[in-house]
Amino acid sequence: MNMTKYEYLIIGAGPTGLGAATRLHEKGLKNWLLLEAENQFGGLAMSFKDDQGFTWDLGGHVQFSHYDTFDRYMDMALGADGWYTHQRESWVWIKKRFVPYPFQNNLHRLDPEDRWACAEGLLEAWQRAQGNIQHSTSNNQHPNSGSSQLIQNPKSKIQNFEDWMLATFGRGITELFMYPYNFKVWAYPPSQMDAHWIGERVSVPGLGGVIKSICTGRDEVSWGPNKVFRFPKQGGTGAVWQAIGRGLPADRVKLNCGVTGIDVTKRHVTTSTGETIGYQHLISTIPLNHLIRLAPGVVEPSRSHELRYSATNVVGVGMNGQPPEHLKTKCWMYFPDGNSPYYRVTVFTNYSPANAPKPGQQWSLMTETSESPMKPVQHDSLIEETLLALEEDGMIPDRSAICSVVHRRLPQGYPTPFLGRDAVVDPLLRAFEQHGIFSRGRFGAWKYEVANQDHSFAQGYECVERLIAGGGPEHEPTLFTPEVVNGRRNP
């Protein structure tokens, strides 16, 4: 059998695979190959045009970074003049009003009764943190979970994400916003999710800051790593990864070439094009549950069922005219209320007018709806349910202006930080590494806290650094020390 063998074989040309290939190319190494099942680069970060010419991303992507290296490649990809830079303007639409994000920092926008319920809960949580009280003075029955769990005393261990919400924010904010919104996002009850992933993902307000906001009525909108972000002027987020991919040597990239099997003993893969390709080191960026199936003999196939994830349904709505006044400057909005299937809506033409085929004369909204066995979605009625909710929420003033509607479903959209995730995932990663297979990326490593585009690119980039150096996890800070990576910028 004639078989080409490579020192480094990469499966998947999304941000992680491109990060690995970019580093190999940058180091001047030549004995490597990148395989991609699709006909373009980008993976979950690719973009597409619908039949009417509107550009869509596969979800609400924005470019912000924890890494100087990532920024350098972004500049190289599109040039300094290929980007728009935006100040984030994100909002929560709740009880038929807009509240600036983060919700918990802007309680003055609520009705007095809701404002007090949230402030009272925060005060009680703060008192508990000081060890001053041990029991709630109000009814602690949670309307969503059906439990009678008390707000956690810091001396008792926080068991899950719901515990963390109650201990951090109290019952008011948890019941009004945190619980319903997070169930809509994750499609799993927060009581079934871990809390160790949170880090910079959720704003934790100080009691003094909350009281100041309530008393002064001033909006607090500057929190978060993505308060300033970039977006390509043309082609959506996928334009970035197309440019990165085109910068690689063409003879080391195979598009339209999926992997159909991996022989871990002989160290070769078979492909959808009928080839057999050998490797010394394999960097896999396909979902870990698929890798288990494709590479028999490493772990029991049933282990893949332990990995929880949610699907994402993207519904894009293109319209003639211009957005209504209340949407003209907004970036994206969160929707905790139960009338809508979506959890987030992006005014996508506010990122770039070129996301519409007739810039200035058309505009677009992009919605995201999560799905899991615990939160099913009726696909055949989702578009109509979405349009009805957009009308009810005041996002679409006139349905007759709609000129394009598209629905794209991502079978795996979010890797769930389920309870016991690390105890499941980490041994799986080690088992594959013993066979020369390094599973990395958003679903390859299953670590949501380091699953943004910059994190994913860095996972591939750093994995190559580790393999070249012949070292250990210390060469991969993004995957193995996410709390450090997310707390500072990295070279």
Image: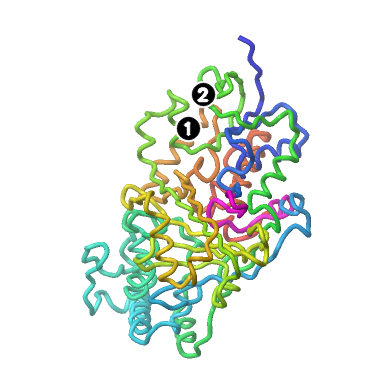
Give the main secondary structure, helix, strand or loop, of the magenta stretch.
loop
Question: Where does the N terminus fall, quadrant-wise?
Answer: top right
Three-letter amino acid code of the residue under disc 1: Leu
Residue at 78%, 54% (x, y): give it: 79
Q: Residues within 10 Å of mark 2 (few under 14, many from 20)?
A: many
In the shown orientation, is residue 422 left or right of residue 349?
left
Q: For mark 1, give the secondary structure.
A: helix
Residue at image position (54%, 53%) is: 482
> Regarding mark 2 in the picture, which secondary structure is present there?
strand
Please give the name of the residue rendered at 61% of the width and 49% of the height, measured from the top-left corner: 49
The picture quadrant where one finds residue 3 is top right
Q: How is the image coloured?
A: rainbow
Mark 2 and mark 1: Cα distance apart in space: 9 Å
Q: Quadrant of residue 88?
A: bottom right
In the rendering, at what x and y percent does residue 313 appear? 45, 51
Who's the residue at 60% across and 47% down the image?
46
The amino acid beneath tag 2 is Ile
Answer whether residue 279 is magenta in the image. no
Left or right of 73? Residue 124 is: left
The residue at which mark 1 appears reads as: 291
> Which residue bears the numbered disc 2?
262
* 458 lies left or right of 72: left
Residue numbers of the magenta segment: 50-73
Q: How many marks?
A: 2
Q: Is residue 381 left or right of residue 288?
A: left
Identify the residue at the far top of this view. 1
148 and 320: which is toward the camera: 320
> Where in the figure is residue 40, as x and y percent of width and height?
64, 39
Q: Position of residue 154 (x, y in %)?
A: 35, 68
